[in-house]
Each structure stands twice: as C-alpha cells, then as structure tokens.
C-alpha cells in the first residue's frame, strides 16, 4: 500500500521580502526582578531566572518594495524579551515533519530540497491590508532588539527588510534584517 501523506505544495505558500524605509521610532525598556506569577504558574516561576528584561522598538515606516505597496505606511514592533537559551540550540531537524517510519519530509522548490516543518514556524506575524497599512510584530531575543536600537540611534539602519511567508495560517515573518548605508558601494581604486 502506497503511503498517503499531504505535503504542502509551492502554490500554498509564497515568500516575499518587504523593504521598509524607517521614519520615526520609540523605545520602551524595562528590567527588574521577576517576582510575581499567577497562582497556576507558581511552579514555572521558581524555575525562571531571577532577573528579567524587556525592550520594544516601535517603528513608523514606509514600504518601498513593490508597486502595489509603494508608499504604504507600516508599523514595525520589534519586541525583545528574555528567551530561554534553548531557542538558539533548536535545529531544523527538531521541528522537521516526519512521515511514516520517522523519515524526514522535504519539498522541492526551484530545484532545491526544503524541509517541511511539523507546524508553521516564524518569528512574528503581519496584520492589516496593504492599501490601509501593515503591522509587523517581530519577537526576538532581548540582545538582538538592543542591537537594532543601537543601529537606529546611530543612523545605521535607514531601511529594514522583512521576509514574510504567506501561508494558509497567515503572513508569518521568517527574517528581519538591515544593512548599513553604503555597504554594497564600491570603493574607488
């Protein structure tokens, strides 16, 4: 009997990178001792680090990427909190879908084999509709948001690039990056 399994087809997802021009931004930060929890979470609280920190950067931006989205106003919320160190140790094989007999699943896209995840994975999501504006909510470790804040303050991140995978589960953010101005300009000889 032939194995029957549903593997997502390329047409079910699409990947786009949005180029955003940074306008203004605001930073919120807090740090302190983690001392409270709901009664149902007291057991989990005792195993948490004593200190906690949180930072959020709210960015007003304009979309530059495609003609349909050109000049659309956007909001980007970079949210950084203490994350368990295991997030950096997580591997693709830890979340890869498996078929019968535990065999890893892949799909072919543009001549390359890509792992199929056991559930949608992302670092954030997108809300809104292009004509009215988009909101990008990105969840990252505290130190990465802190580095973005430094880059913004020094004027080194005038543009942000956000990679979004559109799936049947919504618009899921896969990547967020910036590059310093002139990074790809050639130096005169």
Image (spheres, rainbow, N blue to C red):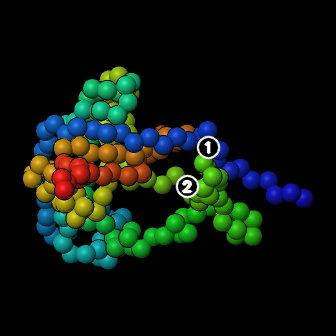
Choose between 18 and 133: the one closer to the eye.
18
Q: Name the residue under label 2.
A: 119
State which quadrant residue 125 falls in.
top left
Residue lying at the far right of the rendered structure: 1
The location of residue 140, given as percent across then percent down, is 30, 58
Give the residue furthest to the front: 189
Q: What element carries label 2?
A: loop
> Viewed as shown, does residue 30 lie left or right of 134?
left
Q: Residue at x 37, y 25 (%)?
A: 67
Relative to residue 139, is residue 22 depicted above or below?
above
Between the residue at mark 2 and the residue at mark 1, the CA separation in whole angstroms equals 16 Å
Q: Quadrant of the image for the N terminus? A: bottom right
Residue 179 % position (x, y) = 25, 52
Where's residue 118, x and y in %? Answer: 58, 58
Classify mark 1: residues with Cα within 10 Å, few (<14), some (14-19) or many (20+). Answer: few
Q: Nearer the viewer, residue 8 or 43?
A: 8
- 89 relative position to 4: left or right: left
**In x, y percent, where is residue 82?**
26, 66
| Residue 118 visible in the snapshot | no
Which residue occupies the extreme left position in the image? Answer: 154
Q: Residue at x 63, y 52 (%)?
A: 111
Task: State how many labels appear.
Answer: 2
Q: Which of marks 2 and 1 is in front?
A: 1
Residue 39 marker = none
Judging by the rendered image, the residue that carries numbered circle 1 is 10
Q: Can residue 138 be seen in this view?
A: yes
Q: Residue 39: which quarter of the image?
A: bottom left
In the foreground, 53 or 165: 165
Dot 2: within a 10 Å radius of its alpha carbon, few (fewer than 14), some, or many (20 or more) residues?
A: few
Quarter of the picture containing the C terminus is bottom left
**As drawn, is 169 to the left or to the right of 106?**
left
Residue 126 vertical placement versus 139 (above, below): above
């Amino acid at each position: 009997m032939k194995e029957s399994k549903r593997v997502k087809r390329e047409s079910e997802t699409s990947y786009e990178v949005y180029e955003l021009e940074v306008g203004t931004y605001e930073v919120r930060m807090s740090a302190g001792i983690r001392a409270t929890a709901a009664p149902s979470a007291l057991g989990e609280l005792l195993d948490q680090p004593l200190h906690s920190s949180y930072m959020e950067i709210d960015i007003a931006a304009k979309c530059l990427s495609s003609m349909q989205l050109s000049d659309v106003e956007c909001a980007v919320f970079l949210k950084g909190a203490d994350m368990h160190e295991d997030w950096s140790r997580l591997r693709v094989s830890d979340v890869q879908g498996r078929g019968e007999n535990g065999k890893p699943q892949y799909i072919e896209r543009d001549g390359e084999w890509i792992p199929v995840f056991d559930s949608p994975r992302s670092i954030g999501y997108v809300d809104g509709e292009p004509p009215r504006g988009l909101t990008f909510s990105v969840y990252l470790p505290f130190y990465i948001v802190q580095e973005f804040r430094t880059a913004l303050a020094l004027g080194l991140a005038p543009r942000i690039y956000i990679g979004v995978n559109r799936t049947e589960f919504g618009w899921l953010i896969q990547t967020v990056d910036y590059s310093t101005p002139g990074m790809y300009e050639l130096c005169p000889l």
